[in-house]
Image (spheres, rainbow, N blue to C red):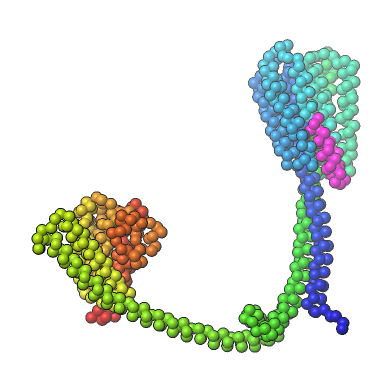
Amino acid sequence: MKRTYSVSTLLSLATGTMVVVLVTVFAVAANNAWRREQASADVAASARVSRDIVSIREAMRAELGVIDTTIAEPFIADAATLARLKLLHGRTLEAMGHIQHEIAELGEDKVPADLARQIRQGMSVFDRQLFPAVLAAAVLPREQRPPHLLVDPQNSVYATLDRIDSQAMTLSRQIAATGPYMSEMMRISDIAWRIRVDAGGERREYANFISWPHKPTQAERDGLIKTRGRTEAPWQSIEKAVQAGGMATPLKMAIARANEEYFGRYSRLRAYVLDTMENGRTLNISGPQWLTLSTPALNSLMEVSRAGLAAAEARSMENLAQARRDLKAALAQMAICVSLALLTAFLVLWRVIRPLKQITHAINHNSDGDIERVLAISARGDEIGHFAQALKTFRKMSDDRQRLERELLQNQVARQTAEAASKVKSEFLANMSHELRTPLNAVIGFSEMMMHGTFGALSERYLEYAKLINSSGSHLLSLVADILDLAKIEAGRFQADFREFDLKSCVEDCLPLIASKAAAREIVLETDMPRAAVLVVADARACKQILINLLSNAVKFSEEKGVITVSLRDMGEMVQFAVRDEGAGIPADVLERIGQPFEQATNNPHVAREGTGLGLSLVKALVGEHSGKMAVESREDEGTTVTITLPRRQERRKLQQAA
């Protein structure tokens, strides 16, 4: 029998092949774009470093020119010259630090690892030894200055520049290899820099003529002629490049300024100095003046070199931006094609084949998991959704029947549990009332008779025992009463006696009941109440119980010699009273549980053992019977304030129930 493949298998193979081919094609394109982006980034970084190298070249040669002129000058250097020396030296150090940082950023694959170290060592010798010696010699007459200062600074600067120039040539070749335009810009920059080097040497020769006036020898004249030839011949190739066009405007402007400054004004100045020296006339130009007059011309050559590098860097940044755009476009195309392929596969596999398999499997096996997945398909509006709708209807009827059966059983269990709990609570209340209150009253009564010596005086020890029995019995009776009251409220058997009475008088009646306990601990009871009566419809006994519980808690948790304040406010339709103490306060993690039965407001065992945790719970329940609110505000070591807010009038339904 001939073997056949399912539709899902064929579609999966076709879709997978299409995705692999598309991903491969666009991955290759994206990889090529990424490589171009990396190459453009490297060229941009190299152009930036080359530009910084030009800056450090200029800074070091400018500083060297001032040093040579200062050392060769016969007079003592003035303050302005010394300040200029320090300023130029600072610029050199700043440029050196910047280039070292740039070298570190490029990495060892672009710049030798020891180049920065060599530059740093060379500048360290110059900065720590030669430059201080130059400053010290500048304030001496020329005949007292060390002769080696005429050559040592030059040797140190030239050695450092040689290291920098070697790397500059490597970077220049790397940049030039990226295209004709970049090659032309780097050629112009290198030519301008070589002319600047020769021009610097020529300026030094003229400075020597000025510092040591004499008629130039034939050898000196020949040297000047050779230097002029090395500067003028290469410059002609730059001028031809300008005439060819395609050059950036800033570079053309820099070349024009160099023609005007160096090959115009400065050339005439050199001819004047040389003619004056050859004819033995007196030259009214000092060394510093010569430096000032020649600097703009040499700077114009440096400007050409910088402009060429700037043009190369700008073109490299354009190439980098284009490479990044190409990379993004390739990635976007790859993502779009892959997304379309995956979407097609998803629509076929997920929306057609998978639902049919699920429906078939659910019908054959009738498992809950399979049926639940099929029910979600019924929401679709196509034929597959209609097919699943029939199964959904059947499933819904089955679920409804099971849910009704479960709810009926749960209701029966809940009713039986509630009836049993109510019966147990009723029996508990009856037994508690008879079995606990009667013996406790007898114990309290007999202990009081023993304390008062009704049938004869007791010894001191037995009297103490009688007091403990009486105190413990009273405490237990109070606990039983609180539990009974709380149980009655929860069972709905609490019968409130709502009548109109003066809440202010109720507060005043409660204060003496707690005064003895407060006095025993030297606690001051203060009140803040209105002068007029505060009439309210409520259960007077419940309000009194609320106040006594709050005052007892305040005394219990207050420090000795503390203050307890009871306040009462008439708020129209509502009345509000509060009890504030200056005690230990309630921890924040306990505060939210206050009001629950047997919840203590403190973890201190010496205080907690005096209560049961039912006081505030009973207060909260009694306040609830009055449709009121209880609020507790507390901070540890600052005190607690419990505020009770009650309606002035009770609802008619509650008044009828009380009646």
Q: Relative to the observer, which residue lies in front, 502 or 394?
A: 394
Q: Position of residue 195 (x, y in %)?
A: 84, 31
The single residue placed furthest to the top in the displayed view is 143
The N terminus, quarter of image: bottom right
Q: Position of residue 12 (x, y in %)?
A: 79, 73
Residue drawn at 38 percent across, 60 percent down: 590
Q: Position of residue 513 (x, y in %)?
A: 19, 61
Residue 525 falls left or right of residue 384: left
Residue drawn at 84 percent across, 27 percent down: 198
The segment highlighted magenta reads: 162-190
Q: Relative to the observer, which residue lies in front, 215 or 492?
A: 492
Is 121 above or below relative to 572?
above
Residue 536 falls left or right of residue 593: left
Residue 339: name its quadrant: bottom right
Residue 80: name its quadrant: top right
Q: Relative to the observer, which residue lies in front, 458 or 187?
A: 458
Is 258 above or below relative to 369?
above
Q: Main secondary structure of the magenta part?
A: helix
Residue drawn at 22 percent across, 55 percent down: 518
